[in-house]
Amino acid sequence: MSFVFTPPAQASVPVVGSSERFPVRRVYCVGRNYVEHAKEMGFTGREAPFFFLKPADAVVPVNAGETGSIAYPSLTKDLHHEIELVACIGTGGKNIKAADALNHIWGYAVGLDMTRRDLQGEMKKQGRPWCIGKAFEQSAPIGPITPAAQAGDVANAEIWLKVNGQDRQRSTVSKLIWNLSEIIEHISTAWELAPGDLIYTGTPEGVAAVSPGDTLEGGVAGLTPLSVKIAAAR
Ligand code: MN
């Protein structure tokens, strides 16, 4: 087959203990999935889970022991960090039952759902899509993927983020409102999951702004940590 121009490179993420990479198909994200974060965003109570997507080319893979770099995005004056556990789908499916859902997970990684909070807030107010606040270039940094069998008890792992060495977010994955199995069940009723899909599972409380020059270091216990520096605007 020939194309009218060179196709874009396949987005991919490094894998712990392997030279092979995990190819990315779609990036699903769960909104307001920790109680204390829902509260800080002005919401209370258990809502039905809801989702948004980022394009695969928003993924910024960062190798173990390295610090990735993302440009401060255009249009915003309020770029926020959201540290998240990312579930990486290895076996697809439609209408996956929660009881079987974990069998569909190939591995886990630490990710950042970077958010143009001012633009997202404006879109919320106007009842418009969140795309401009969430789905911009370089908005989904991610560390290496640990295969599920080696990832330990991620469902109860500590999750944390520091900015310039100062604590910003610290919680535990056990505080997810909708757990990993329930998330997969819900997403797969609306979409057909496929190998290569990433699911950013939501962020705990403590989201706040970052500036060019800041260094973000985040982790989920048992997984390779993620380090990202905010570069100048472009
Ligand atoms: Mn998020």
Image: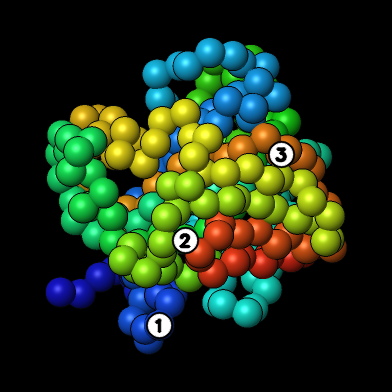
Residue at 40%, 75% (x, y): give it.
15
Say which mark, if any, is on residue 17: 1
Question: Is there a contact, CB below 8 Å, between mark 1 and mark 3?
Answer: no
Please tell me how crowded label 1 is: few (under 14), some (14-19), or many (20+) other residues with Cα within 10 Å: few
- Which residue appears at 41% of the width and 31% of the height? 178
Question: Label 1 is placed on what type of residue?
Answer: Gly
**Left or right of 110: which side holds 108?**
left
Q: Residue at x 28, y 55 (%)?
A: 105
Using the image, tell me which numbered label, if any, was put on residue 109: 2
Q: Is 163 on the left or on the right of 146, as rendered?
A: right
Residue that badge 3 annotates: 207
Q: Is mark 2 within 8 Å of ligand 1?
A: no
* Image color mode: rainbow
x then y, percent, for residue 162: 75, 55
Using a 10 Å C-alpha cutoff, classify the residue at mark 2 as few (fewer than 14 neighbours), some (14 to 19) or many (20 or more): many
Please say whether residue 230 is visible from this viewpoint: no
Q: Which tag, 2 or 1, sits closer to the chain's start?
A: 1
